[in-house]
Image (tube, helix red, strand yellow):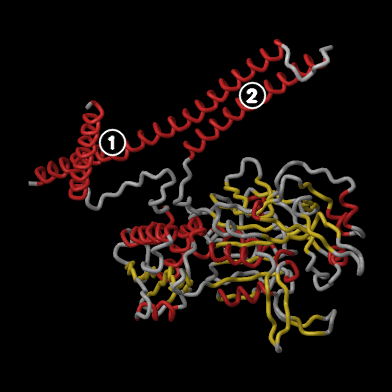
Amino acid sequence: MEQKNRSVFSAGILALLAILFITLTILSSVFLKGVRVDLTENGLYTLSDGTLNILQNMDEPVTLYLYFSEDASRDLPQFRAYARWAGETLEEFADHSNGKLTLRRVNPVPFSPEEDEAAAFGLQGVPVGTAGETLYFGVVGTNTLDGLQLMPFLQPEKEKFLEYDLAKMVSALSHPEQKKVGLISGLDMQAGFNPATQTMREAWVIHQQFSQLFDLQDIPADTSELPDDLELLVLVHPTDLSDELLYQIDQFVLRGGRLLAFIDPMAEADMGGDSSDPMARMQAAGSSTLEPLLTTWGVGFDPNRVVGDLAYALQVSIAPGQAPVRHLGILSVGANGMNATDVASADLQAVNFSSSGWLTPLEDAGTDFEVLVESSEVAAPIDAMRLRFLSNPQDLNRDFQPTGDHYALVARISGQASSAFETPPEGVPQGSHLEGSGDAGINVVLFADTDVLTDRMWVQKQNFLGQTIVNSFADNGTLVANLADQLLGSSDLIGIRTRANTSRPFDRVDALRLAAEAQFRDTEERLQAELQETERKLAEMQSGRQDTELMVLTEDQADEIQRFVERKMQIRSELRQVQHNLSRDIEALGMRLKFINIVLVPVLVVIAALVISYRRRKRREGQQ
């Protein structure tokens, strides 16, 4: 009878909670319409400030189409959950765009005009299930000027990049003009005649890539004035720059211009870059720096030493027929050396460097120094002269002592900075001199290596039916293009970082389980130790006997065995109690979470709704 009453009472409580939940849901939908509160720990549903600025400063109306196959994804909960979150993110984009962004949801069912549109746009269809259904999950963006941007397929594992990719798409569509990029290089990156081989040389692949992506203008290194309409300046191996050009670069950066610079203690493409022998390239290499601008920006750089790294060292061939050896000065930095929070570097697998220097933040610098790519902890500086006259790379290992520090190979410099020039050089107009950056600060990305740009470090070329086919084996070009694209986007786009994943582990439950497992393991080890001690005592008793019938247990042996059996049962009971406590703790945690989600949160929502409604009513009464 008591059990029956308890069941009725529990059913009644559940019914009351259900009624309360429905009531609170209805009230909150009425009084809190349009009000959103992001209670997730990582702000999964809150757009970053950079994204909000992009949306609120759109010049051109944009329409985004979210294509998602509802029927084909019915057995794919991971995709459905990601699609729901992507749709909610896009709704947030539309809500903050002041009407400039329109969202359209499209379900491309099989053999429909919508499916034909998805295929025509270039969205990637993925076969799923045994029935041969096709899953479409992508975003298409258009503007009124026939501009088109495409995200062919949204992969759940790249979820943390979604906000950046969408903001980048909106920024490109709302500001459709092509970006102008200037290139000043002390290396022969363009197509031309190679006097060493008496043949025509092709432009570097990175130069070809920039020509396709941007409106690229090659600027002579002996110029004294930069074009007025540059948005990004790429500076490669700046040697013997005039004071006039250094001043122009200084003022360009202070005015808000973006700079992507490559300096090097040993630029192997300088004079010896066409040689197939790595030793010959290093012997002919020259150094470059960007002083006095670096010091003004709060950056230190040693033009006489390179970074050696045991963990990232690549193998090179020093002679035909000999086995490759590891070269401490030629590095392949893996994912562990990439900045995982910056969208330009977070998704890369390997970037190759050769005889690279490193960058350091100076003390009392007024700028922010953010490392994008760094060495491992088993790295140390090496005198550049050792590499220049090195005959065998194995010689570098003899006295190499890692310092335990990480060395920054690529860094982003931002924040407030002053001019490196008190007054303009002679011949430069005096009236336009800037003594410091504006409120937006400077945006500079520095590489401590120029060889990272050379074809040999990241691409392989093959001739196929008269056409040159380029295959990349490293992410050098991707990193450089990402950074250029990011710098050109806007300061808002630069500030957007990767987001946390929507999937969240049960950290508290995992901690409880680990603690219980540790306790279980300790108890089990104690039992094993007691078992070994009992076996030792039994062996001592047996070895000390003089009886001819050794198989018969003595009274002491029988007592010892009985004591161990009882202790074993007691410890097994302790093990069961550990497991019971684990289940009890997890169940208690679950009950607390249910109470918070079912009772406490709805009550707080209703209270907030009543307060907001009361304030609105008072405000209306005051206006009357």
Q: Position of residue 84 (x, y in %)?
A: 37, 59
Callout 2: few (<14), some (14-19), or many (20+) C-alpha neighbours within 10 Å? some
Q: Residue 234 appears in which quarter of the rendering?
A: bottom right
Left or right of residue 415, residue 76 in this image: left
Image quarter hosting the N terminus: top left
The foreground one among 578 and 419 is: 578
Residue 422 visible in the displayed image: no
Q: Position of residue 307 (x, y in %)?
A: 77, 52
Left or right: 333 with respect to 182?
A: right
Residue located beneath label 1 in the image:
600
**Residue type of the residue flagged with mark 2:** Leu
Q: Which is more foreground, mark 2 or mark 1?
A: 2
Q: For residue 527, which numbered disc appears in the image?
A: 2
Pick whichever of labels 2 and 1 is earlier in the sequence.
2
Circle 2 — which element? helix
Image coordinates for residue 46, horizontal then vertical, percent: 38, 51
The residue drawn where x is 37% and y is 63% is: 57
Residue type at tag 1: Leu
Q: Position of residue 112 (x, y in %)?
A: 35, 80
Secondary element under disc 1, as helix, strand or loop, is helix
Examine the rendering and report whether any part of residue 227 can be seen: yes
Farthest-out residue, front: 549
**Residue under the point 68% across and 56% down:** 334
In the image, is residue 397 above or below residue 125?
above
